[in-house]
Image (spheres, rainbow, N blue to C red):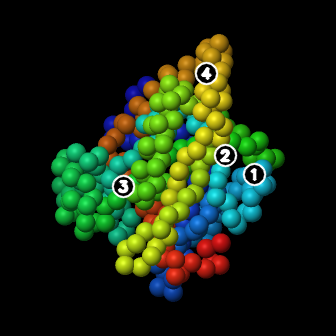
Amino acid sequence: MSRIKGMVYSLPTEGRIVIGTATEEFDGKRTPVALNRFVIKTNEIVNGTYTVHEMHKAVAKATGQDEQKMTFIPIRFIYNDVDVNLRLRYEAYNPLGQLICAGDGECAMRQGPEGLNKVGCPGAKNCEFGKQAKCAPRTRMNVKIDIPTPAGVVNDDYSTFSVKSSDWNSAMALSCKLDAISSELKGNIVGVPMLLTLREKSVLTGLQETVYYLDLVLAQSIEASMKLAKGYADSLASLGINQAGFDAVVKKGLTNSAFDAASEEDDFMEFSEATQTMTSQKKSADYL
């Protein structure tokens, strides 16, 4: 099948999992506010914010958590390829929410007056352009929420929930943990139950700060997970399902462009709302 070059093709998402929100100030600007809990939202915006998804209440009920204090979500992946499940790159946006630079730590594509240019990418902290444009690592992960589908929610095997973060701690934890789990399970992570968890740690930067970040945990022991992984892989093979082919096709669509600006405003606001650091002095009931 022919594709338009420079456009990223991805499967649809059912919604998003966030740990941040945004409040609108008197001047119309949206200010990101950190949360110390998960919120599962739809892709629909009402009154300037994404509405809460039906799965939020369903997950809280299935896991015995308070809806206002959800700190873990049962998930599984639909791809074995870790690079399809989780994508990480440096990104910079202009004040209008338009993507202007995207890089991998070696090379970057930057939007200039005459179009896209290929430039070196020394990383956000070592790039003068990046410092001015507030470049940061952007993590995108797609997961399937692993609970029985509640009434009224369409079950689509090809749709996932997106998880996005602009936090260094989340980027490191998710990337390293997913690589480690995939390695131990010999690359067979499809169907293995896991937990997306919210962790916190204290950081001393003048004032003591509480940093919230994302992590992955196996829902069962490594031995039990290995048995499940092998059993699921054997089951797919016996049914004639080409998991490797599925992963390859999706990966080809995602890598069809090194600079995708199709959903730049959505990504910009979503990453901005995912601010994950707040001072312990400001912690209050507003975050619960």
The residues tagged by marks 2 and 1 sit, at their Cα atoms, a distance apart of 8 Å
For the residues bearing labels 2 and 1, Cβ distance under 8 angstroms = yes
The residues tagged by marks 4 and 3 sit, at their Cα atoms, a distance apart of 34 Å
Return the residue at label 2.
74
Q: Amino acid at mark 2?
A: Pro
Q: Amino acid at mark 1?
A: Thr
Looking at the image, is 262 positioned above or below residue 271? above
Q: Does residue 13 appear anywhere in the picture?
A: no
Q: Secondary structure at mark 1?
A: helix
The residues tagged by marks 4 and 1 sit, at their Cα atoms, a distance apart of 26 Å
Question: What residue is rendered at 61% in x and 80% in y?
Answer: 284
Quick one: quadrant of the C terminus? Answer: bottom right
Q: Earlier in the sequence, mark 2 or mark 1?
A: 1
Q: Earlier in the sequence, mark 4 or mark 3?
A: 3
Task: Report the front residue among 3 and 278.
Answer: 278
Return the residue at label 4.
230
Point out residue 257 in the picture as x, y percentages from the top left corner.
34, 40
Q: Which mark is residue 221?
A: none
Point out residue 225 in the picture as x, y percentages from the top left corner.
63, 31
Return the residue at label 3.
137
